[in-house]
Amino acid sequence: MRIAVTGASGFVGGAVCRAAVGAGHEVRALGRRPHVDPEHVAGAGYRAHDLTDGPPDLAGADVVVHAAGAASDALPAQAHWDAHVAGTRAVLAGLPAHARLVHLSTASVYDPRRPTVRAREDAAPGPAYPDGYGAAKAAAERLVRATRPDAVILRPHAVYGPGEATLLPRLLAAVRAGRLVVPGRGPRAISLTRIDTLVGAVLALLDGPGGTYNVADAEPVELLTTLTAVLAARGVRVRTFSLPVPLAHSIAIIAEATARICGTSPVLSRYAVRHVARERTLDVTTLRDRSGYDPPPTDVADAAHW
């Protein structure tokens, strides 16, 4: 099968390229960076292309895996719109008529203002979002569904694994003198998605039934216990302390303002507060039943090798 992968220079897109090449597919890699290490895409032909410049060359592809985007919650809303909505529109414009589209969305399209409890796919997109990332990803989903009703849309949550450069670095940066302060009170469940789980779902649905699918490891885990175990696997021992949500929200506003002035990413953001202070779990029944893919469990100990 001939597969084109956008966002191939990134964490998820590169993993998709490597897995697809390993499965014997002919892969064409496209990414925003001028060059990538050939090993990152398993030797697939690589072409630099910024989707905000217009449609990419996707001619001849049987499947296009659209993994390009911007995951940082520090970006302004317009940057997310450009990356996710305009970028998706460019992919749709270049998509061959016969090709299958596998669009990588996010569980952030579920309402972040309330707990996400074993969410089913029909619970999103919602009418409004308090952050630019969720709003742009929801708009991109609507665009895909309106243009290509047979497309596959995948909604992973908290993707982790070797090469991940967002979640683990921010977690390590949040540790102060052996303490980790976490917004919200009490235990709460969270669905995590190992990169191999996400890639496995992509490969299972290359020629599977269209539709929208949650993607996550087999079962949710408890957040505070998991954070402590992940840090311990890295040799970092911590005690966790809860922070009331209103106070965390106020601190996040200050952290975001400081980060904008300094040109850095905030250690704590309002987006992060909304997503860790309450339960965030997904129901993956649709993925199991329709694709035949059974996600593996979360392997916390594997964090030592990230």
Image: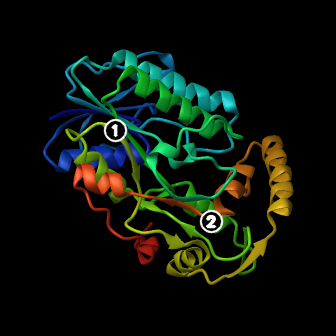
Left or right: 258 as drawn, with respect to 95: right
Residue 229 lies, in percent from the top left, at 53, 80
Instruction: Name the one closer to the observer, 72 or 113.
Output: 113
Query: Of callouts 1 and 2, which one flags the residue occurring earlier in the amino acid sequence?
Result: 2
Distance from Cα at disc 1 to Cα at disc 2: 33 Å
Q: Amino acid at mark 1?
A: Gly
Q: Is residue 50 visible?
A: no
Q: Secondary structure at mark 2?
A: helix
Q: Residue at x 26, y 18 (%)?
A: 96
Q: Position of residue 88 (x, y in %)?
A: 46, 26
Report x, y in % for residue 272: 68, 55
The amino acid marked with disc number 2 is Leu
Q: Residues within 10 Å of mark 1 (few under 14, many from 20)?
A: some
Which residue in the structure is indicated by mark 1? 211
Q: Secondary structure at mark 1?
A: strand
Report whether 62 appears left or right of 233. Answer: left
Rendered view: 97 above or below 132? above
